[in-house]
Image: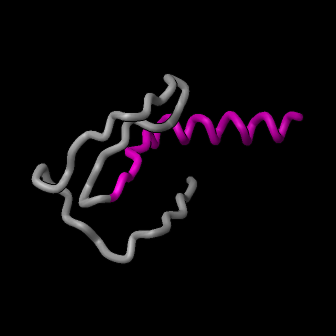
Amino acid sequence: VFGILTEGFPQLVRVNRDVMELHDEQNWSDDSPVICQIRMINEYPLILDLEKLESMLQEQIAATLTG
C-alpha cells in the first residue's frame, strides 16, 4: 500500500473528451511509470502507470532491506 501526494488540484474536474487531448511533446522511456501526458484546460497532468510504480517501489524497498 502506498500513497501519492498531489499538489495543485484545488478542485475536482470532470474529465471528458471535450476538455482533454494527448500532449505528446515528451517521450517517456519504457522503464518510466508514466503512460502519457495530457493537456486539460491549460494544465498538463501525467497519467501514471500505477502497477509499474508499485513494482518499482517494491523493488526499491526490497533493495533497501537487503542492502
Count of numbered tags: 0
Question: In the depicted view, which residue is nearer to us: 47 or 3?
Answer: 47
Q: Is residue 49 magenta?
A: yes
Question: Position of 62 compared to 41: left or right?
Answer: right
Q: Is residue 15 magenta?
A: no
Q: Tell me: residue 19, above or below residue 11.
A: above
Q: Position of residue 66 (x, y in %)?
A: 85, 34
Q: Residue furthest top?
A: 30
**Residue 56 position in % (x across, y down):** 61, 36
Check the image and name the residue furthest to the right: 67
- Dividing the picture into quadrants, the one containing residue 41 is bottom left
> What residue do we see at 10% from left, 53% from top?
18
Residue 59 lies in quadrant = top right
Residue 42, relative to residue 17: is it above or below?
below
Magenta: main secondary structure: helix
Q: Quadrant of the C terminus?
A: top right
- Magenta residues, start to end: 43-67
Q: Residue at x 53, y 40 (%)?
A: 53
Q: Which of the colour schemes (rainbow, by chain, secondary structure, one colour) is used?
A: one colour
Q: Nearer the viewer, residue 62 or 45?
A: 45
Q: Residue lying furthest left in this view?
A: 18
Where's residue 57, x and y in %? 63, 42
At x 37% / y 34%, what residue is drawn?
25
Q: Nearer the viewer, residue 53 or 35?
A: 35
Q: Relative to 42, is 35 on the left or the right? A: right
| Residue under the point 49% across and 64% down | 6
